[in-house]
Amino acid sequence: MKTLDLQETLRERVRRIALEKFNIKLDAIIAEIPPRTELGDLAFPVAFELAKRIKMERGEKLPPRSIAEELGLALENTEGVSRVEVAGAGYINVFYDRATFLHRFFHSLQTNGVSGEEKASASTASASDKIIVEHTNINPNKAAHIGHLRNAVLGDTFVRIMRTAGHTVEVQNYVDNTGVQVADVIVGFEHVEGMTLETVRELDASLPPERPFDYYCWDLYARVGLFYRHGDANAKEDPERLRLRSETLRLIEEGDNPTADLAEYVATRVLDCHLNTMLRLGISYDVLPRESEILHLHFWDKAFERLRETNAIRYEAEGRNAGCWVMPTNFHASTDEHEADKIIVRSNGTVTYAGKDIAYQLWKLGRLRLDFYYKPFRRYPNDHIAWITTSDESKAVGANGSTPNFGGGGKIYNVIDSRQSYTQDIVRQGVAAVAPEVGANASIHLSYEMVALSPAACQELGIELSTEDQKRAYIEMSGRKGLGVKADDLITRLEMVAKVEVSERHPDLAEADATATAHAIAVGALRYFLLKWTRNSVIAFDFKEALSFEGETGPYCQYAAVRANSIFRKLDDEVYAQATKFVSQMNEGDANAKITDVLGGETGDELWTMIALAARLDETIAQSAAQAEPAYLAKYAFQLARAFNLFYHRHRIIAEEDAARRSVLVAIADVARGQLTRSLATLGIQVPERM
RNA sequence: GCCCGCGUAGCUCAGUGGAUUAGAGCGUUCGCCUCCGGAGCGAAAGGCCGCAGGUUCGACCCCUGCCGCGGGUACCA
C-alpha cells in the first residue's frame, strides 16, 4: 500500500460526501500531514472551505465543526482507516489502521521494490510523452566550476526523479561551440600565444594529467580578459582588440578555415574534459547537440525565416542597433543606457545565443521539420552512448538503420541559471511566435540561483577582496577573471578527505575498496550539498561546509543506510524469513492483533512515525517532480535518515526476545533502509558496503 | 528607471494549496559507548517570521505600500 493510494481513496470519498450531503462540488481536496502523531495520519481542512461555499451559495450559516463531524462520520468506515476525529475548529483527522497499513506497505515493497514501476504502468498516457531535459551546457572554453556543478547535479537529479516517477526522459547537453566565449579563448591561442591547430595539439599532448587541457584554457581565458584591457584589469576594453573577437567569431560561424578548425578542436577537447568531470559524479547524457550544426544544417536559417514572417523580429536600419535584427520586447522599459529590444542577429551577420536557442528549442519541440546527423561521442562504462551531432552526413552512423531518434519532446525543461531569465524570456517569446500551437508554456525554464563564494572561501583561494566586498555575504564567481572553484579540484579534495576517514575507520579494507568507498562518500557529500538548498537560494560556497560529513549531509544519510544494512548482515536468515512471513501475510492467526499491539501506546507511536515517514517516498517524488524541486527529495532523505538513526538508537532489533515485536522491528528497519536507499539512488548517491 | 528573486534563531537555511505548540543543520552549553557501527543519540539556551496597512472566523504564507539586500536590463551566456 502506498500512502498515495489510501490518500486518493479518502480524497475521493470526501469529494463524494460533500456532493451528497451538502450538494457542493469541490475540485481540489486539500489533505495535509498533521503536525503530530496524536493528531492522526492525514487531515482534511475541508470543512472550512465547505462552510464558506455553503454561505456563499445558499446564504446558510453552518459552523465548520458540525460539517466536519458529519463528514468525518461518513469517512469512518473506509477500509484501512481505524478512526476519524474532529479537532480544533473543524479539522477532520484520519487515523490509519496501523497493522493493516504496515503489512500492505511491507508486502508491496517485498513484491515490487522499485518504486516507479507501479506508476509507470499505471500512467501510460503521460509516459508515452517524452520529456526532454537540457542541462550542464557549459561553454566549452574552460574547466567546469562549482556553479556548473550545481546546474548538472540539479538537472541530473531532476532526470532521475522524473524517471522514478515513471516518465520517459531524454537528456541533452547543448554545446555552445560557436559563441563569444569560445571565440575569446581562440583569440588567446591565436593572438596572445601565436599558436596554430598543430601547436595547440602538441601543447595538449604535453600537459600533465593534473593540469589537463580545460585547466589550461581556464587560465588562458582569464589572460584574454586582460589582453583586451592591455593588462590592466580595471581598464576599459580596447575596441581594436575586441575586433579580433568579433572577426574570430565570424570565422568560427563561417567554418572551413584554420580558425574554425582550431575552435572545433578546442571546443571538442574541452567538452570531453567536461564529460569526464561529470562522469565522476555519475552524470551522463543521451545527446550533445552543437550550435555549429544549428548553423550548418540551416536550423537557424529556417527559424530566422519564420521569425521574419511572423514579424517577431525586425531589421534596424539606423540608430544604436543599426544593421542588426532585433526582437522588440516589453519585459522592461528602455532607458538611455538600456535598449528594450534584444539583438538576435549582430551587425556583422553572426547570430546571438538567443537566436540559436530559438532554433534549438523549436527542434526540441519537433516544430522545425529538420534533423541533425549523429555519431557516437562517448561510450560510458555501462555501455550507454552519448551521441554528438554532426553536419557531415557521410560520418553519421545509422545507414544500417541504427540512427538514433532525438528531439520532438512533449515537454521541455531547460536547466539554466536565473541570471539568464531575460534571455530565456526572449527565447520563449520567439518560440511562441513561430509555433503558436505549442505556445509559450511547452518549454520550461528550470531556473536556479548562482553559486557564489563566501568571503572565507575567497580568502582560502588567495583572492584579495576590497573592503567593500569583505562586508558582502558572498562574492560572485567570474570565469572571465578566472575566479572560482574548479569542479575537479573540489571532487579530488573531497575524495582525499573521505579516504583519510575511511582508512582510519577500516584499516583492514583493501586499497581499491577504500578508494571506491571514499569516492562514493565524496559524491554523496557533494551532490547532497548542492541539492539541499531550494533552487532560488544563492549558495555561498564555503569549503568547511562542503567538506563536512556530519549533520545535514550526504554521508550522514549514507551512514544511516550502511548501519541498517549491517543489521541485516548480522541477522539470522531464519529470523528474517520469520519476520517477513509474520508481517507480510495478512490475517494469519493472531498476527494482526499482535502487530496492532506492538504499534500501540507511546512506544508504538514512535515506531509508527517511522513507518509513516518511510511510506511517504512516492508522494515526495511526485511533489519533487511537479515542482521541479529536487531539494524536497533531499530534505526527505535526510529526515528519513534522522528518523532511522533515532529508531536504531532506541530499539535493539536482533536482541529483541519477543518474536512478534522483533518481527515488527525487523520489518520497520527493512522498509526504512529500502526507502532510504531508493531516495539516495534517486539523488544519485550510492550506499557503500562499509564506511 | 524598469523587470525578477530574497528578508524566518548568533550563522546558513526549510516551512508545499491559510489553521493546533514556527522547524533543521552549524555554532554554544550539558549529558550518552558492558548494548545491532559515536560520520551517531538526547537535552538546554536561542524567534515582534524586515516594517506598516488590508482581506479573512484565522496570515510567516494572500493583496498593497515602504525599507534593505542580490541579480538582470550586452552586437556575453
Image (cartoon, coloured by chain):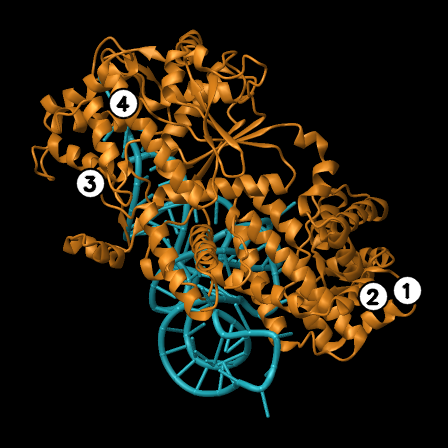
Chain colours: A orange, B cyan
Q: Quadrant of residue A600?
A: bottom right
Q: Is residue A625 visible?
A: yes
Q: What is the residue that sits farthest to the right in this orientation?
A: A589
Can residue A448 be spotted in the picture?
no
Q: Identify which amino acid the numbered label 3 is placed on.
A: Lys
- Tell me which amino acid carries mark 2: Phe
In the rendered view, does B75 fall on the left or right side of A603?
left
State the residue in front, A406 or A324. Answer: A406
Identify the mark nearer the N-term, 4 or 3: 4
Q: Are marks 2 and 1 on the same chain?
A: yes
The answer for how far apart the CA atoms under marks 2 and 4 are is: 66 Å
Residue at the location (71% across, 58% down)? A42
The picture places residue A207, in percent across and down from the top left corner, at 23, 38
Q: Going from the N terminus, do you reach mark 2 or mark 1 first?
A: 2
**Cα–Cα gap, marks 2 and 1:** 8 Å
Which residue in the protein does label 4 denote?
A263
**Cα distance in 3D space between marks 3 and 1:** 71 Å
**Circle 2 sits in a helix, a strand or a loop, which is it?**
helix
- Does the residue at mark 4 contact the one at mark 1 (Cβ under 8 Å)? no
Q: N-terminal of the two: label 3 or label 1?
A: 3
Whole-number angstrom distance, CA of label 2 to CA of label 3: 65 Å
Which residue type does callout 4 highlight?
Answer: Ala
Residue matched to label 2:
A582
Crowd band around label 2 with a 10 angstrom C-alpha radius: few (<14), some (14–19), many (20+): many
Q: Let me know if marks 2 and 4 both belong to one chain.
A: yes
Find numbered disc 4 in the image and state the secondary structure of the residue it sits on.
helix
Label at residue A429: none
